[in-house]
Image: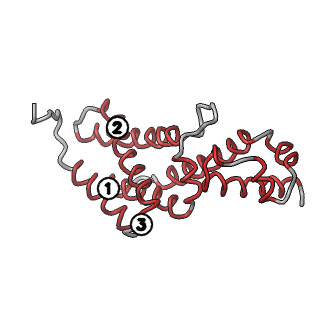
Amino acid sequence: MTGTERRQQLLNVARALFAEKGFDGTSIEEIAHRANVSKPVVYEHFGGKEGIYAVVVDRETQLLLDRMVSTLHGGHPRAMLEQAATALLSYVEDSHDGFRILVRDSPVASSTGTFSTVLNDIASQVEHILAQQFAARGYDEKLAALYAQALVGMVALTGQWWLDARKPKRDEVAAHLVNLAWNGLSHLEHKPKLRLA
């Protein structure tokens, strides 16, 4: 096995273990054992558990971001909302191990690679789109960030729930998310106030 092939094998084994057991429940010994190598081979490639975990998280983060950003390709705002919801749920469906890793709190001291960082990156993309739509409709553009966080959070938390529930089917879940978001958004007030106060 070449060095590149061995590195990929170790990443695949570690990814499966981190998804199954989490960071704390996974050991270098177990990664090495499942890959049929000695512990020094893992250390040679990644320097330790934190190193291999960081690479796994970075790869999953990039995969999710690429999928989300590539789907937001314009069109009607409702279509973009549908694209974003479907993209995230497709990632959950196609890469459930990766999603499980991302939604866990990252023990590695880093400002990147956490699920909240990924969500913030996605929300930034959504904020830009919402700001344009708000301006075109006479709403305060400064509120686009708030609405972007709300929408992305709604989809992401639903994705976490759906990871285990798996019912209803992906497109039905996406349709319900869009129904809630779109029908709620289609009647936005310019200056909303709580009615209970």
Q: Residue at x 59, y 54 (%)?
A: 98
- Mark 2 crowdedness (10 Å alpha carbons): few <14, some 14-19, many ≥20: many
Up/down of 177 relative to 48, above or below: below
Viewer-nearest of labels 1 and 3? Answer: 3
Q: Which labelled disc corresponds to residue 78?
A: 1
Label 2, label 3: how many angstroms apart (C-alpha)?
28 Å
Q: Residue at x 63, y 31 (%)?
A: 109
Quarter location, residue 57: top right
Nearest the camera: 30 or 178? 30
- Judging from the image, what secondary structure is the residue with disc 1 in? helix
Q: Which mark is residue 131?
A: 2
**Residue to which mark 3 is pinned:** 170
At label 3, the amino acid type is Arg
Rounded to the nearest angstrom, the CA distance separating label 1 from label 2 is 15 Å
Q: What residue sits 41% from the left and 52% below the top?
A: 74
Callout 3 secondary element: helix
Q: Position of residue 184 (x, y in %)?
A: 22, 50
Q: Tell me, what colour scheme is on the image? A: secondary structure
Q: Amino acid at mark 1?
A: Arg
Q: Residue at x 60, y 52 (%)?
A: 63
Mark 1 or mark 2, which has the lower sequence index? 1
Residue 115 versus residue 152: which sits nearer the camera? 115
Q: Position of residue 107 (x, y in %)?
A: 61, 37
**In the figure, is residue 48 to the left or right of 168?**
right
Disc 1 from disc 3: Cα separation: 17 Å
Dot 2 lies on which element? helix
Q: Residue 165: x and y, percent?
A: 41, 63
